[in-house]
Image (cartoon, rainbow, N blue to C red):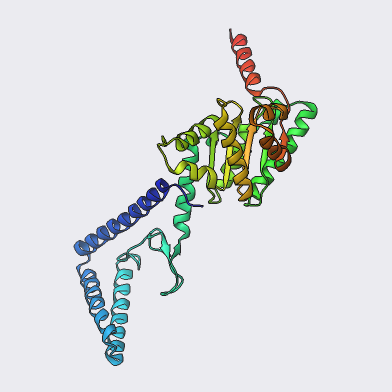
């Protein structure tokens, strides 16, 4: 699955910034050496000049002359290293020092001269962070982690059940693969469905996978815009259908019509066929799902999804009641 083009552009910008920084640091080092250690700078220039001469010799394939020049070059390197050490400077002080020594901040590297270029780990790490930031702009993922899921808001059997739900979600996130099951989080509002789905998203996106989180209303509006030629972001449909994990929040809260019924079925069905896991959060009962989206969607969700029921009392209401009580006590 490709990332949005915006993320590739930003990753290239990060790598370019790293290359520019490394070049700027090298220029500063050369300037310092030229001013304070002119003898070292002359050795450095001599080394650079003869390195340029050596290149054409390699093309002429004169083995004797090439061997002589290489030996001289090695001698110059030794002398430069000794001079730098004597001046208390690092041996690589006059060398370009990229952030990534493997690809030299180009983003791609080869295992051998004739091997196919592959994405360097450093570029993948940049994309991972950008993907997380991208997810954060579309959700509250930074505020939702497994560690922040507080079981104190559940009581008795509900607390014991929700502790199992929490552990199940942790295992799902840690072992996520394209073969992971689809999940349907069902239950009344305010019980932590969004929180745990975003905690899963944060864990999955940190492994370099593309995750899309969207409320059902936003997702279906974007797909409708694409269907009727009004799409501001043509990539959105591709991402919705092709991302490695799709999270649809609050299914049933969107404005319903014949398009949304068909769009929900197509999305659920195609992602299921292509083994692209989906997590759906909803307050609807199975009967309400059938009434709103039809038998085909109900069949997919009830039979093909792993259903996790959330139980307890509205946490948002509990927090609000606690705040009001605390204010009264202060008064």
User: Which residue does the image show at 31% across and 54% down from the upper left?
Assistant: 21
For this rendering, which residue is in front, 274 or 161?
A: 274
Task: Classify 228 as above or below 56.
Answer: above
Q: Position of residue 143 (x, y in %)?
A: 55, 33
User: Which residue does the image show at 50% across and 44% down from the upper left?
Assistant: 239
User: Which residue does the image show at 45% across and 51% down from the upper left?
Assistant: 126
Image position of 171 (left or right of 222):
right
For this rendering, which residue is in front, 89 or 287?
A: 287
Q: Quadrant of residue 102?
A: bottom left
For this rendering, which residue is in front, 320 or 204?
A: 204
User: Which residue does the image show at 64% across and 19% down from the upper left?
Assistant: 317
Q: Is residue 32 visible?
A: yes
Image position of 97 (left or right of 138):
left
Q: Position of residue 279 (x, y in %)?
A: 63, 39
Image position of 157 (left or right of 54):
right
Q: Quadrant of residue 313?
A: top right
């Amino acid at each position: 699955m490709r990332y949005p083009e915006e993320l590739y552009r930003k990753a290239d910008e990060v790598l370019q910034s790293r290359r520019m920084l490394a070049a700027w640091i090298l220029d500063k080092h050369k300037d310092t050496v030229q001013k304070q250690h002119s003898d070292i700078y002359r050795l450095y220039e001599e080394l650079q000049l003869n390195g340029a001469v050596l290149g054409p010799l390699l093309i002429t394939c004169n083995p004797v002359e090439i061997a002589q020049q290489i030996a001289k070059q090695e001698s110059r390197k030794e002398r430069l290293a000794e001079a730098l050490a004597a001046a208390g400077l690092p041996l690589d002080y006059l060398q370009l020092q990229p952030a990534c020594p493997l690809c030299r901040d180009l983003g791609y590297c080869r295992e051998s001269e004739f091997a196919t270029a592959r994405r360097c780990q450093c570029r993948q790490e940049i994309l991972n962070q950008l993907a997380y930031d991208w997810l954060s702009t579309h959700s509250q993922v930074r505020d939702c982690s497994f560690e922040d899921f507080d079981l104190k808001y559940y009581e008795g059997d509900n607390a014991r059940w929700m502790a199992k739900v929490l552990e199940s979600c942790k295992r799902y996130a840690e072992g996520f693969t394209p073969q992971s099951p689809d999940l349907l989080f069902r239950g009344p509002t305010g019980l932590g469905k969004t929180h745990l789905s975003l905690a899963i998203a944060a864990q999955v996106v940190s492994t370099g996978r593309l995750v899309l989180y969207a409320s059902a209303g936003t997702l279906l509006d974007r797909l409708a815009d694409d269907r009727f030629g009004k799409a501001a972001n043509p990539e959105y449909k591709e991402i919705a259908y092709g991302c490695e994990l799709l999270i649809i929040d609050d299914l049933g809260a969107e404005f319903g019509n014949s398009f949304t019924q068909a769009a929900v079925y197509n999305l659920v069905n195609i992602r299921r066929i292509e083994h692209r896991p989906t997590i759906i959060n909803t307050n609807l009962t199975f009967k309400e799902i059938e009434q709103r989206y039809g038998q085909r969607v109900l069949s997919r969700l009830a039979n093909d999804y792993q259903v996790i029921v959330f139980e307890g009392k509205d946490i948002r209401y509990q927090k609000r009641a606690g705040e009001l009580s605390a204010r009264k006590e202060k008064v």
